[in-house]
Amino acid sequence: MRRLRRSGIALALALVALSPLGASAQQPAQPQQPVHPAALPLRQANYAWDKDLLRGSFSYRDVLSDPALIKKLSSGLPMVIAMRAYLYREGEDIPVALAPRVCRVVYDLWDEVFRVHVSEPERERDQAAVLDGVLRICTEARDLPVVRRGLLAAGQPYFLGVVVDVNPVSPEMVEQMRRWMSRPTGSTGIGPGDALFGSFVQLFVRQIATSDKTLTFRTQDVLNVPPP
Amino acid sequence: MAFTFLPALARAQAVRTWGGEPDTPAPTTSASAPPPPPPSPPEPPPVTLGTPVPGSASGPSGPPTTEATPIVRMPGSIGLKYTLEGIEVRGNTTTLARVVLRYVPLHAGDVLDVDDPELELTRFRLLGTGFFRDVQLSLRRGTQRGNVVLVIEVVERNTIIVDDVWLGLSADVDPSGNAQPLTAYGGARVTETNLAGTGVALGGAFAVADQQLALRVRLADPQFLRTNWIAETELLYSAARDFFGNRDVLVDDPTQTFHDFAVAQYKRFGGRVGAGHDLGITSQVFLDYRLEKIDATLPLAASDHRGLDVEPIDFMLVRGSSILSTVSATFVNDTRDGPFLPTRGHHLVASVDGSLTPLGSDYTYAKLVLKGQQWFPLPWGHVLQLEGFVGSVFGNAPLFERFYVGDFSDLLPDRVLDLAFDRRPAPNFLSTDIVEIRYGNYAAKLDAEYRIPLYRGTRSIYGVDVFGSFGVYGLANEVDFVDHARGYTGFATWPVDLTFNAGLRIDTQAGGFVFGVSNLVGLAPVRGVQQGAARP
């Protein structure tokens, strides 16, 4: 028993020693918002005050730089480009505002135009466009309503941390799909509790990313927050 | 092999393929060379096109042949609906197109709504078959305005899967019944999950140890006769032996010259047919019938100590040839978020087996098993798993159908394909009469496992977790409830013991692996008196 106890103590020490490593090495599947937004690559944006409303303009056209995504735009099936711009006070990691923008595109095979539906805080619109128009509409934020001045501290620097997802899959959808694939429903699952299915299907559970592509960046500071 | 379900006219059209992304995880890009920001207003108006002039539609599909437009557009959403003219499968060099089409709920003539989530689910269903590395869906124009063809482009993958690999050391006996040093055992289970592209799975398994061999061949069709029923059949062969008693065993067997153990040798040959069906997205039910012939060679007589008494050994097999014929039903409810390293959800299995004389069986028994596992994600990223097991056998079941101590103690090798490799009794940390029991008709176990994720990936290694587990289990026969082994009193009459394990769980492209220290600890002489506390 003494040897056993010694083994147990050694195991406990090993677990304690590994614990911080585990915590730091674990990678979240998909960040809900930038974890350390200040460290993201810098990208230029234009800001403008519309009375007490801060508006921002910036481009993320490179989110569709992959030719495969451009091809997919024309697949006849919907593509969603979802942008989330979090407003942070410099030096802090908790956002004070969020400005989302969702662009949903589908190629109309018979009219040969792209049908675009854009949703953002103050606007919702349907348009038809050719490819250049789609890129302009869906990958450029123009005068995006960001935040009212009342939520900001005068004289303090703020910046936007931006996450752009192409074809994001909702957490509910991911959960449903993972459940689907954790089981032999309609697949070659051989039997309940069979190790075959577990290790086999895991391959594809892992392949389900939460979007086709994700782009993250931050903007330069907004320095001129006027007093209310 | 591409298969097209279209009229000749449509096949003559130029092929347009959309999608076809490489098999890489979704890239996460941090912009480094950003494009310049767009200027502030005014925003140039997008090009807006109205309904095209008749005959103006051009491109690979050719002009529309009719001006009747069944395309429906709804304000506020994309809202495009077409008439599905056909489904085209591309990229399938091995898998039959009809196998792909089993997973597509749409048919020619259906109204196809581009916003229908069923389209995306179809893609994931196809990925879930395991036949494909990538699946992309797209539409192309049909032969008439408003008609479209759904194009399913697949990239096939290797479908030969190594399900299990077993390797280990066990304490065995030689042919004379003498305890011998550690011996090795091993085995593997391999499955071709898409046999000749038909979607049928063909699997084989073997396990070998000193003078033991087990073979399995299994065939399963996940969509039997294009229904939602899973059909499965399995052939089995085993040349096995098992060990009874620990020392001072009296054996009347001319082949056994020493009497440390009594050895039962038996062969099994038979098969099983079964069917399974979904009961919703997380539940399934399976029904099986099994028929086996068993040939057992047993000592003429043998006795062993039970506590302070000497009792005859029950080998739990019919001497000579016998028939085992059973029917069984299994219910599974599975909400895990991952099969090998789950972080949440549960996995419940309930099964009942019956072997009756009217079914031609020489063994009359019923077996009930209920097993549940629940995973809890902890706020700091670790995972806690709780597991419970209860099972009972009523009647005269063959030994390989009874509950085996090694299946409950992590410190003894599990059975592999029903072969028991190890002759040792339970470790008996609590000094109870569990040491007297190798097979039981009643079993229960409670276990907790704590997992710490070390690594998560998307390539060949999906995850590495370090784990530690601790549990308590009990194993008993009817006699242990009504007539305790003499020499045990108080708590020692409860046939329970502790078990623990620790190590790494590694989830890889080739399957899941567990590297535990328990077997090594089990081989160390930590169990004290081997024969139990009450031995004279």
Image (cartoon, coloured by chain):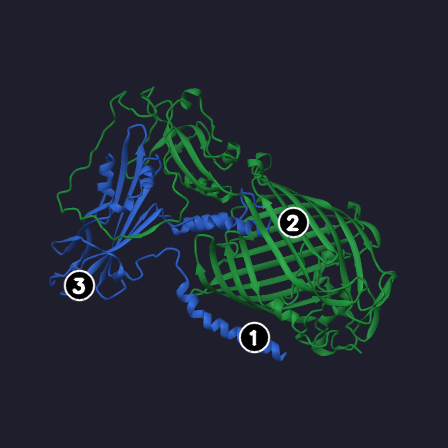
Q: Tag 3 or tag 1, which sits nearer the N-term?
A: 1
Amino acid type shown at disc 3? Pro
Image spot of residue B138 (x, y percent): 38, 35
Q: Which mark is residue B70?
A: none
Left or right of B396 on screen, residue B54: left
How many neighbours does mark 1 have within 10 angstroms: few (below 14), some (14-19), or many (20 or more)? some
Q: Which residue is mark 3?
A: A157
Label the blue chain with its letter: A
| Distance from Cα at disc 1 to Cα at disc 3 | 53 Å
**Residue shown at 40%/32% (left/top)?**
B112
Packing grade of label 2 (10 A; few <14, some 14-19, many >=20) is many
Residue type, label 1? Gly
Q: Position of residue B459 (x, y in %)?
A: 44, 52
Q: Which residue is mark 2?
A: B205
Please tell me whether mark 1 sits on a helix, a strand or a loop: helix
Can residue A129 be seen in this snapshot?
A: yes
